[in-house]
Amino acid sequence: MSSIIYTYVNNNCHYRSIAVLDKRIEAAVRRGVGVFGKKLPVPQKLDDAIQYSVFPGGARIRPTILLSVAVACGDDNPSLANASAAALEMIHCASLVHDDLPCFDNAETRRGKPSVHNKYGEPTAVLVGDSLIANAFGVIARAADKDAVRAAKLIALLSKYTGFPKGICAGQAWEAEISVDLSAYHQTKTGALFIAATQMGAASAGHDPEPWFELGARIGEAFQVADDLLDVLCSEDETGKPSGQDVTNQRPNAVSEYGISGAKQKLRDILGGAISSIPSCPGEAKLAEIVKLQSNRLLPKEHMKPVA
Amino acid sequence: MSSIIYTYVNNNCHYRSIAVLDKRIEAAVRRGVGVFGKKLPVPQKLDDAIQYSVFPGGARIRPTILLSVAVACGDDNPSLANASAAALEMIHCASLVHDDLPCFDNAETRRGKPSVHNKYGEPTAVLVGDSLIANAFGVIARAADKDAVRAAKLIALLSKYTGFPKGICAGQAWEAEISVDLSAYHQTKTGALFIAATQMGAASAGHDPEPWFELGARIGEAFQVADDLLDVLCSEDETGKPSGQDVTNQRPNAVSEYGISGAKQKLRDILGGAISSIPSCPGEAKLAEIVKLQSNRLLPKEHMKPVA
C-alpha cells in the first residue's frame, strides 16, 4: 500500500484489515520474485530490474481486492490465496513495464521514478515483463500442494485475463486497431485484472468465481474513469507518471466524453453499482466496507465526495 | 514438421511414429491459440499476428521430443501431454518473436518470411509474445481435469524453464551482461526448453521428471552446436533466418571455439551422450531410435555423418 494511502489510516477496523492484507501481499510478492534465491549464477541486470519493477509497489490494489474477496469467502487456503495475489501483482507490474516501452507509451517515468526501459534499457525491460508473466504462473503452481484442482482453476483464470482474447494483452492491442469495440477495449485493457482479482479471490477460497465477475468489471470501470480524471486533474508529481497521456496518445477518455463533473458522477454511480453487486458470502458486509474505503481513495480527497 | 524434414520420410516405423506425433502437435497447437473461437470482438491485428507467428511452424522439435518422451513413459494422459506440447511450442514461438525485436536481434526474417515486428509492427510483436506466454499456461490448466496434481507440476516446470532465473528469459538476459557465465548462458538460452521438453514429457505421463534433465540438457547442447554450425555453413535461404548473426552480435559460438570439424565432432559426442543418458522406461529403445533420427537431421546430410 503506498505511503499516500497510509496517511489516511485511522483506527477503523477495516483499515487494520487492509494493513494485514498488505503484509500478506508484500511477503507473497517478495517470495514470488525471489523464490530461487541467489545461489546460482544469475544475469544480475535482469535480477535487479525485476526487483526494481516490483518494489516499492504502487497501491497493490488488485491483490488487495483479491485477498479481500478471499477473506470474505472464508479464506480456507491462505497460502494459495497469497500466491494468487502475488501472481496477479506480478502480471500487473509486467504490464506496466511493457506498456511504458518506447513502442507503446514511451513513458520516461513510472511511480515517480525512471521507467524500467529508461533505467535498464529496452532489452532488459522486455525480459522483465516476460519473466514476470512466466514466473507468475509458477508461483500459483508451486502453491498447489493442498488443492491442485483449485490451483489449476486459478491459473486458467489468470491466463484468461492476461492473454488473448480476453486479457490485458488484447486490451493493449485494441489501441492498434482502426475500428475499436469500446466495450471490449475497456473490459480487457483495465477491467481484466480487476475481474481476475475478484474471481481469483473467490476461487482461491473454493467459491464459484462466476458470480464475482460483475464486481470486478465494475471496479475496473471505476478505476478507468478515475484514471481518466487523474490524467486531467493531477500533475505528474501527484500520479508518478506523465500527465495528459490519453490526449497525447489519442485514447478514448471518460472526461472528454462526459466532462469533469459528469465523469465524477459516473464514477460514484459505478461504485454504488459495484457495492450492490457483491455476491452473497460470509464476509459480505465487511467486503462492502472495504470496497467503499478503496473507492474513496481513487481520487484525491478534494476531488471525491465519499461513496455512501 | 517442416517440409525439408518430410523429404527424408521413408517407411521406417520411427518416421511413422513421428508423423503421428506431428498430427497431435499441430492439432494441439491449433486448439491452444484458437481456443476461444471468433465469437467475441477481438483485436484483429493481434489475432492475425498470433496465427502468423505459430503457423506454419518450424520443425516443432521441442513438442516432438516432449511427446516422444511421454510415449516412452506410457502416455497414460494423452490430452495433458498434448496440451503440454502445445504450451511448450507456444513459449518457443513467443521467444522467437521477442528475440527478433529491434532491441535484440533486429531480424527482418524468420522461417523464410518477414519477422512478426517487420510485418505487423513492434507493438503487436511485443503483444504476440506476451499473449503466447500467458495463454500457454492456460492451455495446460484447462487440460487439468483428469489429474490436476500433474498439471500443476507441468505448469511449474514450464514456468521455471521460461522465466527467471533458470528459463529462456534469463538466457537472453545473459547477452546484456558484461561478465557471462557461459555454462548458465547456454543452459538457459538454448537448453531450458529442451530440458522442459524431456521433463514435461515424463511428468505428463506421471513419471518423475528429475532423471530426464540430462537428456534435455544434452539435446539442448547439441542443438546449440548445430545452430552455431548452421550459422556459418548455411545460407539464409536454407535456414530461413539471417546468416552470421552470432558474429554480427558478438555471441559465443562453438565454431569460433573449436573450428568447423571440431564442432562437428563435439556435436556427435554430445548426441552419443544424450542417447546413453535416456532413463529406464517402457519405451527406452524406441526413444533412443527417435533421438538418433532427430539428431541426424540437425545438419544438412552433406555436413553430418549419421549418429550410430
Image (cartoon, coloured by chain):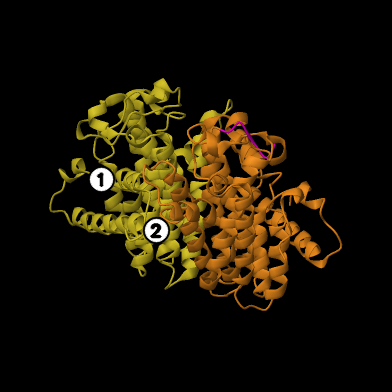
Chain colours: A orange, B yellow
Q: Which quadrant: the C terminus of chain B? A: top left
Residue A58 at x, y percent in the picture: 68, 47
| Relative vertical location of residue B232 with respect to residue A183 in this rendering, above or below | above
Residue B147 at x, y percent in the picture: 45, 71
Left or right: residue B74 versus residue A58 is: left
C-alpha distance separating marks 1 and 2: 19 Å
Using a 10 Å C-alpha cutoff, classify the residue at mark 1 as few (fewer than 14 neighbours), some (14 to 19) or many (20 or more). few
Residue A67 at x, y percent in the picture: 66, 64
Asked whether residue A237 is in view, the answer is: yes
Q: Mark 1 highlights which residue?
A: B56
Left or right: residue A181 versus residue B28 is: right
Q: Nearer the viewer, residue A130 or B22?
A: A130
| Relative vertical location of residue A77 with respect to residue A259 in this rendering, above or below | below
Q: Amino acid at mark 2?
A: Ser
Q: Which residues are magenta?
A: A107-112
In magenta stretch: residue A110 = yes
Image point (65%, 59%), residue name:
A268
Using a 10 Å C-alpha cutoff, classify the residue at mark 2 as few (fewer than 14 neighbours), some (14 to 19) or many (20 or more). many
Image point (31%, 27%), residue name:
B242
Q: Amino acid at mark 1?
A: Pro
Asked whether residue B210 is in view, the answer is: no
| Relative vertical location of residue A241 with respect to residue B29 in this rendering, above or below | above
**Upstream in the sequence, badge 1 or badge 2?**
1
> Picture quarter containing residue A217?
bottom right
